[in-house]
Image (spheres, grey):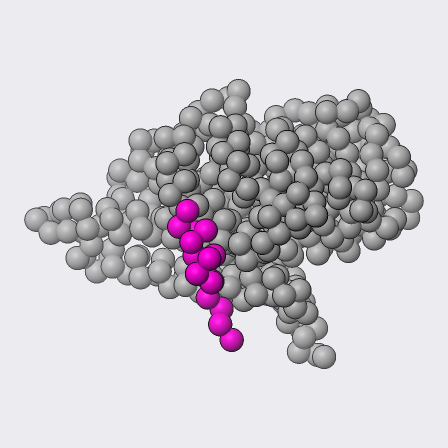
Amino acid sequence: MNFDFSDDQKMLKDQARKVLADKSSTKAVRAVLEDAGTSFDAGLWSAVAELGWLGVSIPEEYGGLGLGKLELCVLAEEMGRALAPIPFSSTLFYFTEAVLLAGSEAQKQAVLPNVAAGAVIGCFAVSEGPGAPSPATLRCTFDGAALNGVKIPVTDGDCATHAVVLAKEGAGVSLALVDLNGPGVSRKTVKTLDPSRGHAEITFTNAKAERLGPAGEGWDIAERVLDRAAVLTAFEQIGGADACLEMAVDYAKNRYAFSRQIGSFQAIKHKLADMYVANQVARSNAYFGAWALSTEAAELPLAAAASRVAAIDAYHLAAKENIQAHGGMGFTWDVDCHLFYRRAKLLAVQGGAAPVWKEKLVQRLERRNAA
């Protein structure tokens, strides 16, 4: 079994790296992070749309390129490497996947071409505050036509035009598709550790919405969306972790202490080796997840949980040790280490924190072993 990407996919990866190196430098990331009135880089978003990246996994009949999930994995890794300050993951990993999985033909025709064109920015509203959400804890309600309740925090909810919302409907849970620019929707920006990715508190007051998927099946559909997003987010985290490793290696080669490169000292060597091993473990799990995602394999739930857990651990370690490898300089505002640490901490809780995914991994391993 060949887990490597094809030549065409590697070409897409190279193109993405060049474009993002030019348009999403750390200077551009800092501009978004430091500007309280800006939640994403609109220029980069337009460029990504023009390149067709927003439609890479959307079928051609809905205005996309129809390439597939592996190409989306490739782009996810490069987005993570560049710390791209755009709502790429919210729109494609969550919102688009939900519409593709559960949307009616009319909903797909209405929404997906606009996603591919960059006109629709999507978000996935599940959380309602601290703690892992569950059907029993949901307070947001949907009556088949209108939404009522509060979702917080919603990643990219401050700039999104549309949302897929998880809400109670009668005795069950359903998904609702809502235009966030319509009546009955109010938003308030939420501050997070990483201001280069916007977050919001969204309040729905009899907001007009339409059901996405069958009534009462929202939780199961949401779980499937989260599994898909977990694999894609793992690639984003690996991109960031590899960038941290490269930064640390470069600094260790060029920083001298006691007339020696600091990379020659055993303590630094061990840090770099640990980062490399964790990154490779995460990559192997993510490749398993990419295969399962692209083939709709039965192993996808297990592969998704393994990918997510390994990637969270790898990115956190890489971001932390990158700061340590830079010594006193690593803690300063002028050095870029903190940008990756912020993103690592943010992605570690987006779509479910590590304890949630570790519990899922254990449960799925037990089910597989009992079969």
Tell whether position 10 is magenta. Answer: yes
Image side of residue 303 versus residue 333, left or right: right
Q: Is residue 278 depicted above or below 218 in this figure?
A: below
The residue drawn where x is 60% and y is 44% is: 55
Q: Residue furthest front?
A: 61
The residue drawn where x is 47% and y is 62% is: 5
Residue 129 appears anywhere in the view: no
- Looking at the picture, tell me which residue is in the foreground, 208 or 352: 208
The residue drawn where x is 61% and y is 26% is: 189
Q: Position of residue 202 (x, y in %)?
A: 71, 30
Residue 50 appears anywhere in the view: yes
- Looking at the picture, tell me which residue is in the foreground, 11 or 308: 11
Tell whether position 14 is magenta. Answer: yes
Image side of residue 327 versus residue 7, left or right: left
Q: Position of residue 11 (x, y in %)?
A: 42, 54
Q: Position of residue 346 (x, y in %)?
A: 52, 42
Q: Position of residue 171 (x, y in %)?
A: 91, 48
Quadrant, the C terminus = bottom right
Q: Residue furthest top?
A: 37
Image side of residue 9 versus residue 58, left or right: left
- Looking at the picture, tell me which residue is in the foreground, 72 or 94: 72
Main SS, magenta region, reads helix
Image side of residue 320 versus residue 204, left or right: left
Q: How many marks?
A: 0
Q: Which residues are magenta?
A: 1-15
Q: Is residue 331 depicted above or below 285 in this figure?
A: above
